[in-house]
Image (cartoon, rainbow, N blue to C red):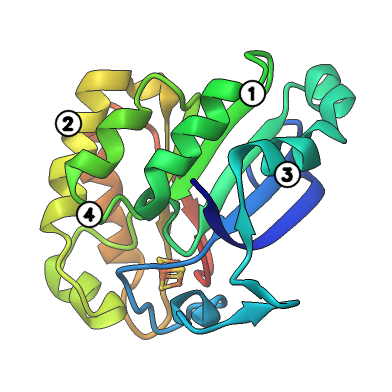
Amino acid sequence: MTGDIMTISRLRMGTDGSGVTTLVGLFGCPLHCRYCLNEFCHDTGTIYNGTPRGAYTPSELIDVLKKDDVYYRMSGGGVTFGGGEPLLQSEFIREVCQRSPREWKKRIETSLNVPWEKIEPLIGSIDEWIVDIKDVNPDIYKAYTGSDNHLVLTNLKLLASRVGPQKLHIRVPLIPEFNDYEDIDISVKWVREELDVEPEEFGYVGNK
Ligand code: SF4
């Protein structure tokens, strides 16, 4: 089994959860956000250094992560899986999590716009789910991403019921030319009422 990895960014602080983290970006995404900063995540033909894409086995990735083991343990950090949409490779992520030290925090940055079957296997492995919901309004979501958000809202409710609100970190972005502060208020209200989570509002969207 290999993970299709487009980037490994070490020694990050304050952007992917608390503590020192390594961001592992995985190829593939079902969405086409208009302001995507990683548009190349959709590129299925990329070859790196003669290797098909960025293929890593779970052991190879863990060897890279281990370089910062002491920082993870001292700061409460760990590994954060992002993308692209990391849940498209949930089996690989599960394998990495299961073979990694329990003390490392495992986080995932996701749109949750994937079938529930991609989410459920990770429920016992992920310490924090960082979800960018874009906007709960289906028309805004569709205009911005090109996709429906029905799956996102359904998955969010199911996930909240399975892992509890304390493991959810919900981001509600301002998306220039697509939503405004009134729309954000509606999304925030939905998150509070349906998930019992206080979401993070942020001013500009680009990526998850
Ligand atoms: S912004 Fe994130 S969710 Fe949207 S297309 Fe880019 S990688 Fe996918």
Looking at the image, tell me whether mark 3 or mark 1 is earlier in sequence order.
Answer: 3
Q: Is residue 99 left or right of residue 144?
A: right
Above or below residue 52? Residue 100 is: above
Q: Which element is circle 4 on?
A: helix
Marks 4, 1: nearer the viewer: 1
Q: Nearer the viewer, residue 178 or 43?
A: 43
Q: Which residue is mark 2?
A: 158
Q: Which element is circle 3 on?
A: strand
Q: CA distance from mark 4 to mark 1?
A: 39 Å
Q: Which element is circle 1 on?
A: loop
Looking at the image, tell me whether mark 4 or mark 1 is earlier in sequence order.
Answer: 1
Above or below residue 187? Residue 99 is: above
Which label sits on residue 186? 4
Q: Which residue is mark 1?
A: 100
Residue 78 percent location from the top left of the image: 70, 31
Q: Quadrant of residue 181?
A: bottom left
Looking at the image, tell me whether mark 3 or mark 2 is earlier in sequence order.
Answer: 3
Residue at 45% over, 32% down: 94
Which label sits on residue 22? 3
Q: Is residue 95 left or right of residue 189?
A: right
Q: CA distance from mark 2 to mark 4?
A: 20 Å
Residue type at mark 3 is Thr
Residue 86 percent location from the top left of the image: 45, 52
Residue at 76% over, 55% down: 9
Find ligand 1 in the image and state its quadrant: bottom left
Residue 23 percent location from the top left of the image: 67, 49
